[in-house]
Amino acid sequence: MNTLVLLCAFIMGFSIMTVELLGGKILSPYFGGSVYVWGSIITVFMLALSIGYLVGGRLSLREPNTRKYGTIFIIASLTTLPLVIWHAELSDWVFMHIEDPRYGSLVSSVILFLIPTTIMGMVAPYSVRLLVANTESSGQTAGFLYFVSTLGSALGTIMTSFYLVLWFELDNILYGVAAVLFVVGIVAILFPKPLPKAEKAELYNE
Amino acid sequence: MNKLLHLFLASTCVFITALIAAPAEAKILEEERSLYQNVYMVQEHGYICMRFRKKSHNDLSQSCIFEDGSKQLVFDYYKLAMGATFFLDEPKDILVIGLGGGVLVNHYKEIYPEANITSVEIDEVVADMARKYFSYTDEGEQYKTHIRDGRVFVKRAQRKDQRYDFILLDAFNSDYIPEHMMTKEYLEEVKSILKPGGIIMANTFSSSALFHHESETYHEVFGELYQIRFEDEKTNRVIVVSNEKLPEKRSLLKKVNQLKGIMMQYGVDSLRVFDAINTEVNWDTSAKILTDQYSPANLLK
């Protein structure tokens, strides 16, 4: 029963790292392949994810359900599209305005990645909310969820850097990510999953 | 569990023994960790070399000079790179992307004393070592060293309308290739900062799958290209291209003869290098070109 949520979290973990790794390839024609370009990308991803965790956690307070959960995936998919379509123009624009490649890459990263990655970050805490049955098992459930989603991240990292870039063009991989997230979102919306039983009882008791 | 622990301890011991037992034939003059790599200055077999790895293997030396101060070039690829001079007519502005030890820049300075030479090197430690051990210097109005990514430099040069007569692309080391500096878009940017009839020379590889993709990418951007490679040299080659039609090979002979003397000082046999120049299409022309969208250069090795 929980497989759907776990699978969704796995795919999101995969997607986040795919986008992050391709971020380096998106920015290097304008700002180089130096450590500070990676520094900018990682900073923005960490920042975005942390905001996403915060917002996702809050969101899970109000009538959590898989419909809303699926909607997050669809929004994540849609906010990835401008990144795919305009990354060259946007990087070029920043390149024209900021001489220092450190701040250039940082500003570009914010413009390109902050919003989609924030939305992607919302999935983790929301998944926990959908899975946790009671307070006693909450740690174990959260732990297992992190296990699954981080495993997805690891696989996304290695697949992207070892194979995907060899098989496909950059934009096509990103379109692939957007498409997968969209489909996952639709699936989550179409298969509503009741909240774990014990938790439901608690809710009604309140 | 105990078994695992034993296995771990045993393998750790083997690893440490291997480290201690590693032959220490080369004398390390200096080592410094930079943002990008470890830079080792070593002295071995009568050479002073810059290496990015400790392990002794000739291929891994980036730049070498003779310890006794001889001007002779150590590597074949330096000699191939000297072949670019046959295509040049007193270049005024020279751009070198990838300074390394500065060996080639030092020689171009001697051959073209009037030229302005701009060098771009991403690694400050590499440039410092070049100054300290390879007598590279950028003192004087004519010479400049920029510490930045080559692609970023070229893009800025394009916007600032800086143009060069001769551009040397040498931003590679033996095991890492900057993927954003092998693409069609990059080559187009480099082409755009070349003065009409200027020459671009790239020092690259002549083996692995990358060879086909790279050659096809150059061909896509520049049309016909000259390659300079020795038959017995398996790993390096030099590509010469221009934004205009390249000269006929036999028209280079005059320059080859003119430069014979100075080339001899560097241990370069002009005629042998001349023989090594050809326009033969020796790559798989169906190889996919490298672009900013598709540039798995490091995976194509």
Image (cartoon, coloured by chain):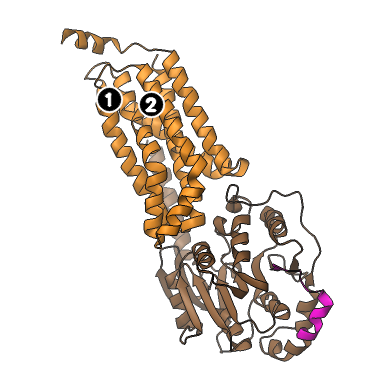
Cα–Cα gap, marks 1 and 2: 10 Å
- What is the quadrant of the C terminus of chain A in the image? top left
Label 2 marks a residue whose chain is A
Rendered residue at 43%/34% (across/down): A79
- What is the quadrant of the N terminus of chain A in the image? top left
Numbered-mark total? 2
Residue A59: which disc? 1
Question: Relative to residue B276, is residue B284 depicted above or below?
Answer: above
Question: Relative to residue A188, is residue B251 depicted above or below?
Answer: below
Question: Relative to residue A118, is residue B180 depicted above or below?
Answer: below
Rendered residue at 24%/21% (across/down): A61
Residue A72: which disc? 2
Label 1 marks a residue whose chain is A
**Residue range of the region highlighted in magenta in the rendering:** B241-256
Q: Amino acid at mark 2?
A: Ile
Mark 2 and mark 1 in contact (Cβ < 8 Å)?
yes
Give neighbour class at mark 2: few <14, some 14-19, many 20+ (Cα, 10 Å): many
**Outermost bottom residue:** B261
Residue B178 found in image quarter? bottom right
* Residue A19 visible, this angle: yes
Q: Amino acid at mark 1?
A: Leu
The hue used for chain B is brown
User: Residue A150 or A70: which is nearer the viewer?
Assistant: A70
User: Residue A8 or A81: which is nearer the viewer?
Assistant: A81
Query: At numbered mark 2, what does the secondary structure look like: helix, strand or loop?
Result: helix
Task: Give the left or right position of residue A115, taking residue B190 as reference.
Answer: left
**Outermost right residue:** B250
Q: Earlier in the sequence, mark 1 or mark 2?
A: 1
Residue B268 percent location from the top left of the image: 71, 83
Rendered residue at 67%/75% (across/down): B81
The hue used for chain A is orange
